[in-house]
Amino acid sequence: MTAEHWTLLADVVSVVCLLGGAFFVLAAGVGVLRFPDLLSRMHAGTKPQTLGLVLVLVGLALRLREGGAVWALVLVVIFQMLTAPVAAHMVGRAGYRTGKVRHDLLVVDELTRDLQAADARTADELGADASAGDELGADEPVADASDAPDRPDAPGRSAPEGRPSA
C-alpha cells in the first residue's frame, strides 16, 4: 500500500471514531435527561461520556498526526480516565448520604451496611471515651450516635420512603 492509501485509511478510521464518539456523548446526554434517579444519571453522565470523549480524541489524533498534538490528546485521555471515576464515586456517595438515592431501585446496597458498621464503631469509641470520663470532665457532653450528621440511615433517624428501617 502506498502512503496515500494509509492516509485515506487513517482518515476513514478517524471519521468512524469521531462519529462513534459523538454517538456516545449524545447517548450520555439523553441518559442524563431520561434516567429516573441520581445513580442512573451519574452512570449515564460518566461512562458513555468518557468513552465518547476518548473516541473523539482518538479520531482527532488520527486526523492531526502531529507529535505534539497527539501527546496533548493522550494527556487529556489519561486525565479524563483518572478523574471521571473518582468524581462519579464522590458524587454518588454524597448523594447517598444526603438521601438523594432511590433505595427501591438498588439491587445491592453495600453502603448502608458499611455506614451502619462505621456508626457502631463510632458509638463504641464514644462509649469507651465516656467510661474514661475523668479526662473529659463531668460537665462536657459526650456525643452519641444521635448527634450524627443528618443522614437518613443514622440511628434514631427515620428511613426514607420505600426503604425499611434497620
Image (spheres, rainbow, N blue to C red):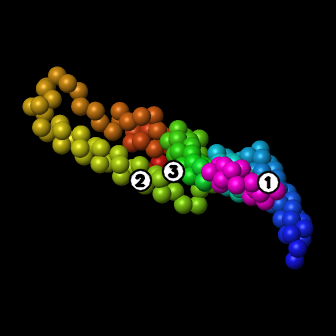
- Earlier sequence position, callout 1 versus callout 2: 1
Q: Amino acid at mark 2?
A: Asp
The segment highlighted magenta reads: 57-76
| Left or right, 140 with reference to 16 | left
Residue 66: say if magenta. Answer: yes
Where's residue 144, x and y in %? 29, 36
| Left or right, 16 with reference to 162 | right
Q: Nearer the viewer, mark 3 or mark 1?
A: 1
Q: Residue tagged by mark 1? A: 64
What residue is drawn where x is 46% and y is 44%? 153
Q: Amino acid at mark 1?
A: Leu
Residue 23 sits in quarter:
bottom right
Which type of secondary structure does the marked residue at label 1 adopt? helix
> Badge 3 local density, few (<14 within 10 Å), some, or many (20+)?
few
Check the image and name the residue furthest to the top. 139
> Badge 1 local density, few (<14 within 10 Å), some, or many (20+)?
some
Q: Residue tagged by mark 3? A: 164
Q: Nearer the viewer, residue 12 or 159?
A: 12
- Earlier sequence position, callout 3 versus callout 2: 2
Q: Residue tagged by mark 2? A: 114
Q: Nearer the viewer, mark 1 or mark 2?
A: 1
- Earlier sequence position, callout 3 versus callout 1: 1
Q: Give yes or no for contact between labels 3 and 1 (Cβ–Cβ under 8 Å).
A: no
Which type of secondary structure does the marked residue at label 2 adopt? helix
Q: Amino acid at mark 3?
A: Pro
What residue is drawn where x is 11% and y is 31%? 135
Q: Is residue 61 above or below residue 102?
A: below
Residue 63: say if magenta. Answer: yes
Where's residue 33, x and y in %? 77, 44
* Disc ID at residue 166: none
Chief secondary structure of the magenta portion: helix
